[in-house]
Amino acid sequence: MSSQQANTNTGDHKLKLIVFKACHVAVWADSKMTADERRCLSHLTEVLCKTQAERKVFREIRLQEINEDLLLSEIEPLSKEEKAYVFDACLETLASDRKINLLELKFLATLRKVCGIGHRSYQKKLARVCQKTKARIYPTKPILSIAFLFFILIFVIIYIQYRPERIDINLQEACSGKEISVSIISPNSPVISQLPTTQAVFDHVRDSIVSVRVFINYDPVCRGSGSVIGTDETGMLYIITNKHVIQNSSINKHRREEDRLRIEVQQTSGAKFDAKLDFYSREHDLALLAVKGMKDYAKPLQINLKSGLQVGQSIYAIGSPLGLDHSFTAGVISALRETYLQTDATVHSGSSGGPLIDQYGSLCAIVTKGHETKDYGFALYSDVILEVLEERKELKIDTLLE
């Protein structure tokens, strides 16, 4: 690091913490930390810390699980020089064990975009650090990468063709192929009325929000939440939820081949309906459930896209955090990240798949993950629902062509 960069952190405790947390996330990019990387972090602690109190804080950080999305949001507002310093510190830390693998390179690629490091500048920095530390990048040559990928491709093709028949222990997709009609609020839509009170928001959407449970025989094994987002020509309603709510390791762990899997959705009124997995996305952590007989009890929510949202706007989460069905919490849009909407509305385990609702009673986003220790929640923008519906349509076309 240059002397100018080295001096960047000397008087800023907050920047020191960001640098250390970034390096901590970097060395765990491949889900493990080598002895050399551990020594490098210890050395970094000595370089950055001037007091025992600072060293204590840094040691506590090493014992925590740091959320990568929150870390990147802390880096975004830094100055250009501070971002360059953070990136260089992470790069040198990763190279400390003389090896940078593909997963670590992936993290560096994400970090350099947030830090505003151009691709050419990134390549120069990477080459300079590798030369200095004698680190190598795995695979070391492009031809080896191509050969390795080609071998994997051949293996997958052979496996698919000749693998033995078995029963899939996850829920089976049963796409109806029917066109799903949804209602979208666009910037050109007529102005819609804001609901007067928080209670009015809940009353407006309550019947369209469900808790989702997966049963093995009669025993519930996992749960989440979902929202009614559309209907087809037959009156079938479709619910969007997270894919991990209905396909996860808990099902694999508890189910035997002879067991029966069943999905049940429940409204706030207590009404229960059987649901089927209609489609799950290959690109996103989302799935569509189809429900018969629910048309007279619920109506699809309108969808508000990312372009219609603003930071600071009121937002409401409805779901089943910690198993508490149909909980209603309020907050604001904390940030509009590139991929996720960030909110301080309370979300926990069980909120997955539940909606974030705006003051118009429209669906803005689908909750996908929360933070274990702080009130930070992340949700996929409703725009992604349209991508899932396109995926589903392409599946229908592919099926017809077979």
Image (spheres, grey):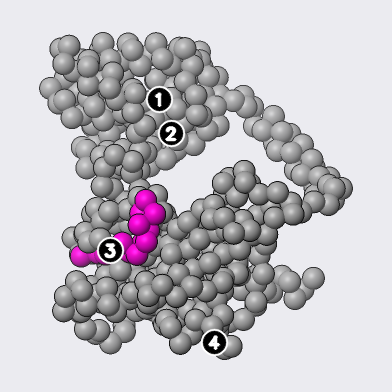
- Between label 1 and label 4, give the one nearer the viewer: 4
Of 400 and 346, the residue lying toward us: 346
Near mark 4 (Cα within 10 A), the count class, few <14, some 14-19 or many ≥20, is some
- Between label 4 and label 2, give the one nearer the viewer: 4
**Residue 287 drawn at (x, y percent):** 54, 63
**Residue 291 drawn at (x, y percent):** 55, 76
Near mark 3 (Cα within 10 A), the count class, few <14, some 14-19 or many ≥20, is some
Mark 2 → mark 3, Cα distance in angstroms: 38 Å
In the rendered structure, the answer to whether residue 57 lies left or right of residue 307 reads: left
Near mark 2 (Cα within 10 A), the count class, few <14, some 14-19 or many ≥20, is many
Answer whether labels 1 and 4 touch (C-beta < 8 Å): no
Mark 4 → mark 2, Cα distance in angstroms: 49 Å
Q: Residue at x 20, y 74 (%)?
A: 199
- Which is nearer the N-term, disc 1 or disc 2? 1
- Between label 3 and label 1, give the one nearer the viewer: 3
Residue designated by label 1:
91
Answer whether labels 1 and 2 touch (C-beta < 8 Å): yes
Q: Residue at x 26, y 30 (%)?
A: 18
Q: Residue at x 33, y 12 (%)?
A: 42
Type of the residue with mark 2: Leu
- What's the mark number on residue 108? 2
- Between label 2 and label 3, give the one nearer the viewer: 3
Answer whether labels 4 and 3 touch (C-beta < 8 Å): no
Answer whether labels 4 and 2 touch (C-beta < 8 Å): no
The part of the chain drawn in magenta is 314-327
